């Protein structure tokens, strides 16, 4: 079984982002970039499945600028076998990314495609579901547990009401929740080894997909600031304020 | 052209946030239709028809719709999509799972999780976990939009009498089968809709200590929340998690106890009307969003808080 894992390069989750003065976006120059956190869970799960002898190959793919190669390289360092970079100018909308991934799926013919449930930059939460629509494959989103049962997967999904379990036939798409597993760190020897693993580079423009944006970003702004609050000196004062000033208790 | 709202329900009743989604959808166009897909969902369909903003209800029933599998739902919407300028749904796990499947099939770039309708094609949406707001304009002829329910008020729930049209179901998608759902039952208000939320963080130090949070929540008739750190440490189940990767809450009163205020937590609660922070670290980022900050040891402050509330004897119902 072959697992394709899609990974995205995003601003590191610990970075306090800043909006550009001209309101065209957020500042990305000289900002620490990392793998989108739930994509790390997706890679980890694929590698675990391979280690358990249930998969033969894990391929990491990223769609993005040249530098997204670092993100693919990191996936190789934690156990992916080979990498693919679909090179684009700038960041694409999830619809375009899913169309490009569809081309990669048609080429690589994986049995499973894993990715994070959502990217923490645009917060769209679309690509996995869109890819499964384009392929007409089953989808298991927000996965917190995956069990392989012959040609099927039993997946537990995190939903608003609690947990839901579904059974999906392979080939299938799974989008991973942060609680699926604990991603490992790459060891130094594995980072060195990863440098020798192949990364195939493909130009998005060669895949015959219309990736032109359909959504115009008119402006990006800072959210309205909360008014500065006060510090109270005692619980009694807090309760009085909540009762008499804020009137919420 | 009309706007189509996909109702979220449990076959008996509408989910409360459907009313918020109706409010948002009605701002995108005047002729609002609502579709309910399920099994034996006649009562919920009737409730949908009573919402004054809804002009027509479409009801689709089959056994394979009972458990809201997106692979079964999407083709129903796609078949009807020609008549609509907008397809709208809540950005909760139901809508997040379903809408992109519809959008991709219609070759439409979805606009996710909007918090404001600026015009029928222009929307405000948070990005980077709410650390920036983007104003976006959809250039697609058809718009697929998910809305953040807590950013819109619920619509009027009675007085309407829309017609209910039944539509034939599509065939079942055989490669996805529902197995089971484990709903977390609680007598407390639901975290997503509670008027008061009391949350604990890593500062609670153990699951056992969460009893303090529970007693405070009991006293205030509040839902119980938690930071990701507390969930990851195993103090409490992840259905309580507030934040970018958990639930986004907008209560009248949010009390953060022993929570430092990581960016990802703030994203889930900073729109609350009044925020209280209790933390012994005076430099904790949570104080930057708190209306009332108390720098104190929570193990002393929370019992005192309970005492003070008992003195007031104002049990909120």
Image: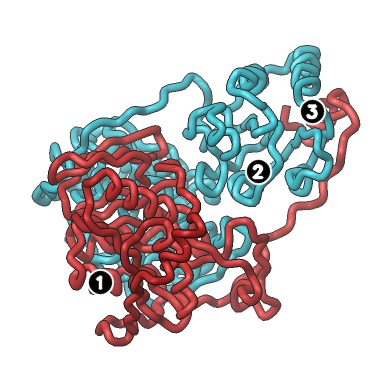
Chain colours: A red, B cyan
- Count residues near mark 1 (Cα–Cα under 10 Å), then give few for <14, some for 14-19, many for 20+: some
Is there a contact, CB below 8 Å, between mark 1 and mark 2?
no
- Give the residue at the far front of this rendering: A189
Q: Chain of mark 2?
A: B
**In the displayed structure image, the side of residue B305 where residue B12 appears, left or right:** left
Task: Tell which residue pokes out farthest to the bottom in this image.
Answer: A206
Residue closer to the observer: B39 or A124? A124
Q: Give the percent coordinates (x, y) of residue B8.
A: 34, 43
Label 3 crowding class (10 Å Cα cut-off): few <14, some 14-19, many 20+?
some
Count numbered badges in the picture: 3
Q: Is residue B2 left or right of residue B203?
A: left
Camera-side mark, 1 or 2: 1
Numbered badge on residue A243: 3
The Cα–Cα distance between marks 3 and 2, rounded to whole angstroms, is 17 Å
Q: Which mark is residue A148?
A: none
Image quadrant where residue B183 sits? top left
Closest to the observer, A187 or B167: A187
Please tell me whether mark 2 sits on a helix, a strand or a loop.
loop
A179 horizontally vs B9: left or right: right
The numbered disc on residue B272 is 2
Estimate the x, y position of residue A218 in percent, counting from the top left. 55, 77
Residue A104's tag is: 1
Q: Residue at x 40, y 34 (%)?
A: A161
Tell me the chain of label 3.
A
Task: Residue at 72%, 39% (x, y): give it.
Answer: B275
B289 to B124, vertically: above or below = above
Question: How far from the left and from the top, in percent, is residue B249?
Answer: 57, 41
């Amino acid at each position: 079984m072959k697992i394709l894992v899609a990974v995205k390069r995003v601003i590191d989750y610990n970075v306090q982002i800043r909006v550009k003065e001209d309101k065209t976006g957020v500042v990305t120059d000289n900002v620490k970039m990392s793998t989108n956190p739930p994509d790390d869970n997706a890679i980890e799960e694929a590698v675990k499945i391979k280690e358990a002898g249930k998969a033969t190959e894990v391929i990491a793919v990223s769609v993005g600028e040249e530098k997204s190669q670092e993100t693919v390289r990191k996936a190789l360092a934690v156990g992916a076998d080979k990498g693919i970079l679909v090179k684009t100018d700038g960041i694409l909308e999830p619809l375009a990314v899913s169309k490009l991934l569809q081309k990669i799926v048609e080429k690589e013919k994986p049995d499973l495609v894993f990715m994070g449930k959502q990217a923490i930059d645009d917060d769209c939460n679309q690509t996995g579901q869109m890819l499964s629509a384009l392929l007409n494959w089953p989808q298991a989103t927000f996965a917190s547990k995956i069990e392989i049962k012959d040609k099927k997967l039993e997946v537990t999904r995190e939903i608003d009401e609690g947990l839901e379990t579904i059974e999906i036939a392979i080939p299938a798409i799974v989008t991973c929740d942060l609680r699926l597993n604990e991603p490992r760190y790459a060891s130094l020897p594995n980072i060195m080894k990863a440098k020798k693993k192949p990364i195939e580079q493909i130009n998005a423009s060669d895949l015959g997909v219309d990736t032109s944006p359909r959504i115009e970003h008119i402006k990006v702004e800072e959210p309205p600031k909360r008014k500065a609050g006060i510090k109270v000196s005692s619980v009694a004062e807090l309760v009085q304020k909540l009762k008499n000033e804020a009137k919420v208790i | 052209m009309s706007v189509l709202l996909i109702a979220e329900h449990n076959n008996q009743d509408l989910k409360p946030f459907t009313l918020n989604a109706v409010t948002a959808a009605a701002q995108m166009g005047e002729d609002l239709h609502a579709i309910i897909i399920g099994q034996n969902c006649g009562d919920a369909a009737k409730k949908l028809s009573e919402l004054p903003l809804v002009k027509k209800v479409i009801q689709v029933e089959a056994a394979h719709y009972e458990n809201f599998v997106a692979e079964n739902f999407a083709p129903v919407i796609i078949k009807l999509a020609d008549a609509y300028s907008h397809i709208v749904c809540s950005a909760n796990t139901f809508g997040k799972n379903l809408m992109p499947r519809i959008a991709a099939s219609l070759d439409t770039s979805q606009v996710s999780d909007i918090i404001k309708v600026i015009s029928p094609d222009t929307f405000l949406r948070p990005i980077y976990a709410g650390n920036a707001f983007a104003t976006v304009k959809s250039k697609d002829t058809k718009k697929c939009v998910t809305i953040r329910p807590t950013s819109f008020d619920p619509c009027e729930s009675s007085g309407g009498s829309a017609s209910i049209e039944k539509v034939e179901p599509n065939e079942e998608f055989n490669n996805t089968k529902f197995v089971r759902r484990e709903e977390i039952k609680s007598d407390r208000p639901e975290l997503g809709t509670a008027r008061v939320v009391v949350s604990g963080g890593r500062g609670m130090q153990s699951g056992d200590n969460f009893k303090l949070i529970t007693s405070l929540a009991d006293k205030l008739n509040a839902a119980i929340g938690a930071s990701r750190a507390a969930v990851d440490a195993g103090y409490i189940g992840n259905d309580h998690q507030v934040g970018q990767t958990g639930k986004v809450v907008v209560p009248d009163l949010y009390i953060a106890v022993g929570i430092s205020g990581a960016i990802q937590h703030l994203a889930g609660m900073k729109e609350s009307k009044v925020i209280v922070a209790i933390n012994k670290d005076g430099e904790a980022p949570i104080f930057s969003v708190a209306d009332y900050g108390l720098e104190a040891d929570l193990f002393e402050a929370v019992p005192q808080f309970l005492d003070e509330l008992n003195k007031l004897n104002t049990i909120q119902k």
